[in-house]
């Protein structure tokens, strides 16, 4: 849980810096107006103060979280956090006053005459604000961690449904071949083994070119049963996108299952890409679709596309069965 408790992201620090400068400028400006001092000097001094305190906080707290707290028992975390947060406010105040003097800004007498007391008070306030921000960041990190674990759990569950679905169809094909042609049955078993070896990796996403390679091997496997009647046509250059593994393969499997007509010479599958909208298009010239309702396999695929790439599967034509895979921003880091 170390990363959850101690991780403060760069974006968090950016927001903290903006908030610190804004509130420093606002309260200093207001104080200068109420005490009838130049409001412009007050606004600039507040900005310097907010920036200096945030700068010390970034250096001290980042160093503490990365190099000190992970090596110590959690019982020491709170007192050290109090100390470093207080020092950020205390030293940041000193730096802000020093910068204001360098710029020739007019200071309220309290800052001139009671610099130590003022620095202590601001140091305490900095700790209080820092404690509230820490609670917020920790809760946000915990939520992100839980969401990520949930997604990984769902993906593992969906993938355990996927492989048996493919194996069930492949084994049925082999069972039919055993009684027709033993040599073809043996070749089919070897191709199933090769296909599974290529696809059994822990990555949830595949590069499009690797997915297409798997699809070609799958079609070779199916063509043992269908006597080379299944043909894949790829239009255009293959883009360097990532997508959930087995995405196109499952659509091809679905097309063969529902679109193949023994009376036709062949079943042609046409794969193309919409480069502007990140859409993979798979069309076939087989039998028309009777329903847009997804079965188990397509529902499984649609959920994986949603979870991993914020996308969706869509049927755009039922007469000439056409599927679109909309690929959004993929979450998992992969080298494509």
Image (spheres, rainbow, N blue to C red):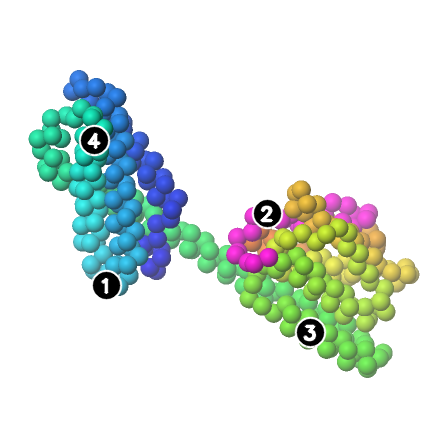
User: First in sequence: mark 4 or mark 1?
Assistant: 1
Q: Which residue is mark 2?
A: 328
Contact, mark 4 vs mark 3 (Cβ under 8 Å): no
Residue at the spot x=82%, y=62% of the render? Answer: 230
Nearer to us: label 2 or label 4 = 4
Cβ atoms under marks 1 and 2 closer than 8 Å: no
Give the quarter of the figure containing the C terminus.
Answer: bottom right
On the image, the x and y values in percent for residue 206 come to: 61, 60
Q: Which mark is residue 313?
A: none
Q: Which residues are magenta?
A: 311-336
Q: In the rendered image, is residue 29 in sight? A: no
- In primary-sequence order, the first of circles 4 and 3 is 4
- Kindly check if marks 2 and 4 are in contact, taking CB atoms under 8 A apart as contact: no
**Residue denoted by label 3:** 194
Q: Residue at x 71, y 49 (%)?
A: 273
- Of mark 2 and mark 3, the one earlier in the sequence is 3
């Amino acid at each position: 849980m170390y990363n959850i408790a101690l991780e403060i992201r760069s974006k968090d620090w950016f927001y903290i810096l903006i908030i610190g400068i804004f509130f420093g400028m606002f309260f200093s400006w207001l104080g200068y107006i109420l005490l009838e001092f130049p409001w412009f000097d007050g606004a600039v001094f507040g900005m310097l103060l907010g920036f200096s305190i945030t700068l010390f906080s970034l250096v001290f707290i980042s160093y503490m979280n990365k190099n000190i707290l992970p090596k110590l028992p959690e019982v020491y975390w709170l007192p050290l956090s109090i100390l470093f947060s207080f020092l950020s406010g205390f030293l940041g105040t000193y730096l802000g006053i020093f910068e204001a003097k360098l710029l020739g800004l007019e200071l309220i007498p309290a800052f001139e005459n009671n610099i130590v007391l003022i620095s202590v008070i601001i140091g305490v306030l900095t700790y209080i604000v820092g404690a509230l921000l820490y609670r917020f960041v920790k809760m946000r990190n915990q939520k992100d961690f839980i969401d990520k674990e949930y997604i990984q759990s769902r993906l593992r569950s969906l993938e355990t449904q996927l492989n048996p679905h493919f194996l069930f169809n492949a084994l049925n094909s082999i069972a039919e071949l055993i009684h027709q042609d033993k040599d073809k049955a043996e070749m089919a078993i070897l191709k199933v083994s090769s296909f599974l070896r290529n696809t059994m990796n822990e990555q949830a996403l595949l590069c499009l070119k690797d997915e297409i390679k798997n699809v070609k091997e799958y079609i070779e496997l199916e063509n043992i049963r269908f006597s080379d009647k299944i043909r894949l046509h790829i239009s255009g250059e293959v883009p360097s996108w990532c997508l959930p593994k087995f995405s196109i393969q499952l659509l091809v499997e679905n097309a063969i299952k529902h679109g193949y007509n023994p009376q036709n010479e062949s079943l042609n599958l046409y794969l193309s890409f919409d480069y502007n909208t990140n859409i993979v298009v798979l069309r076939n010239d087989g039998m028309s679709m009777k329903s847009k309702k997804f079965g188990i396999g397509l529902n499984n695929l649609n959920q994986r596309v949603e979870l991993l790439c914020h996308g969706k599967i869509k049927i755009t034509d039922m007469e000439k069965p056409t599927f679109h895979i909309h690929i959004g921003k993929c979450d998992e880091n992969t080298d494509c």
